[in-house]
Image (tube, helix red, strand yellow):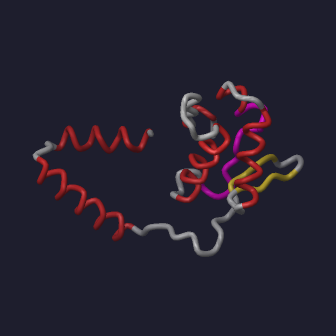
């Protein structure tokens, strides 16, 4: 995993460490960052994002406190197994949600190209 997928808006009222924490937590809880995936070092991610190392270190500390990542000397920082109680949607749930979304977008009059573009943009955000 590289820091390329993470974005920090320095003009946002949300502190940069919280933006990093929230984005990584979402990637982990949705399975886009699978268990065992190695994260960049604090120093590397800070350099990639143009932030101070302390900012990234705080985000990592909070993720570790939430049991979403583990840091081990020599092994680096890796995605931990999801804690008990974190729900991963199954295919049927996702399909039902997609059907509801498709129905709502059709009711708005959006065509398939517009809908796909909107979903892709939302996934990148």
Residue at the spot 54% in from the left edge and 53% down from the top edge: 26
Instruction: Tell me: 78 left or right of 114.
Output: right
Residue at the image position 21 percent from the left and 38 percent from the top: 114
- Nearer to us in this view, 11 or 95: 11
Residue at the spot 64% in from the left edge and 58% down from the top edge = 35
Task: Identify the residue at the far right of this view.
Answer: 73
Which stretch did the figure color magenta? 34-45
x, y (%) of residue 98? 28, 59
Q: Position of residue 74 (x, y in %)?
A: 88, 46
The quarter of the picture where residue 91 lies is bottom left
Residue 66: x, y in percent? Answer: 70, 61
**Where is the C terminus found, in terms of image quarters?**
top left
The answer to whether residue 32 is magenta is no
Kindly identify the residue that appears in the image at 60 percent across and 53 percent down: 25
User: Which residue sits furthest front?
Assistant: 13
Which of the 4 quarters of the picture holds residue 103?
bottom left
């Amino acid at each position: 995993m590289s820091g390329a997928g993470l974005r920090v808006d320095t003009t946002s009222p949300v502190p940069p460490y919280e933006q990093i924490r929230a984005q990584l937590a979402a990637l982990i809880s949705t399975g886009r960052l699978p268990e065992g995936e190695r994260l960049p070092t604090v120093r590397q991610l800070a350099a990639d994002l143009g932030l101070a190392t302390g900012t990234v270190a705080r985000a990592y500390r909070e993720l570790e406190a939430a049991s979403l990542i583990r840091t081990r000397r020599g092994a680096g920082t890796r995605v931990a197994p999801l804690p008990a109680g974190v729900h991963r949607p199954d295919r049927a749930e996702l399909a039902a949600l997609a059907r509801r979304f498709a129905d709502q977008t059709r009711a708005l009059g959006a065509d398939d190209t517009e809908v796909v573009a909107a979903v892709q943009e939302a996934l990148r955000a």
